[in-house]
Amino acid sequence: MKRPISFPIAGALAALLLPILLCGASPRHDVHISYCKADMTGRTLTGTVTIYRDDFIKALRNWKGIELHTLAGGAMLAAVTEFLDRHLAATADGRRLPLTIVSTGTDNASMRFTFSYTSASPIVSMTFSNTILFTEYGDQMNLMAVKTPKRDYNFIFTPSKPNGSLEL
């Protein structure tokens, strides 16, 4: 039998979530983390990286004085692409791959960026450098899960270990 949520728990959840939903503010968080999930198909790696919204806004402001809410359309896409290309780099067999932002999304707490990297030739190995938000937070961790045709890879990038490799 399924137990209903008791009033004190439901009341506590409502007290925590209602201000966030009404104000559109990002909830305060003490953990600094991003998550990236990607799939390798042929010569293309496609994925989505999710970053806390307030952390990303702070990073853009610190990086180039950019206020994200003042940008629209192409200007926002250009700033996001330049930032992510700088902090989420991929090389295939020693060749730096160009980053393409496919789409963006946001909610009250996070921002999502769907991206792709495509190689002109077949890929034998890839190396990633994921330094997203390392300048802002010494405790930042960037998780990355990559699914390839042969196996799955999981990486935890930290300021002391910003790189990871995989073999195809």
Image (tube, rainbow, N blue to C red):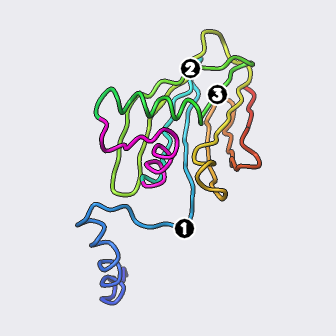
Q: Of the residues shown, which amino acid type is indicated by label 1?
A: Asp
Residue 73 part of the magenta-drawn span? no
Q: Quadrant of the N terminus?
A: bottom left
Query: In percent of the image, x 62 and y 37: which residue is there?
Result: 146
Prevalent SS, magenta region: helix
Q: CA distance from mark 2 to mark 1?
A: 33 Å
| Helix, strand or loop under label 2 | loop
Give coordinates of residue 28: x percent, y percent: 44, 67
**Image height of 154 relative to 24, above or below:** above
Q: CA distance from mark 2 to mark 3?
A: 8 Å
- Residue 131 numbered tag: none
Q: Of the residues shown, which amino acid type is indicated by label 2?
A: Pro
What residue is pinned by disc 2? Answer: 98
Query: In percent of the image, x 45 and y 45: which residue is there?
Result: 61
- Start-end of magenta stretch: 54-71
Query: In percent of the image, x 68 and y 40: which residue is there?
Result: 153
The reply to whether the C-beta atoms of the residues labelled 2 and 3 are less than 8 Å apart is no
**Mark 3 burial class by Cα count in 10 Å: few <14, some 14-19, many 20+:** many
The reply to whether the C-beta atoms of the residues labelled 2 and 1 are less than 8 Å apart is no
What residue is pinned by disc 3? Answer: 90
Query: In percent of the image, x 44 and y 38: which residue is there?
Result: 113
Give coordinates of residue 53: x percent, y percent: 42, 52
**Image height of 94 relative to 31, above or below:** above
Residue in the foreground of this view, choosing between 162 and 3: 162
**Mark 2 burial class by Cα count in 10 Å: few <14, some 14-19, many 20+:** few
- Residue 30 numbered tag: 1
In this image, 69 relative to 57: left or right? left
| Helix, strand or loop under label 3 | strand
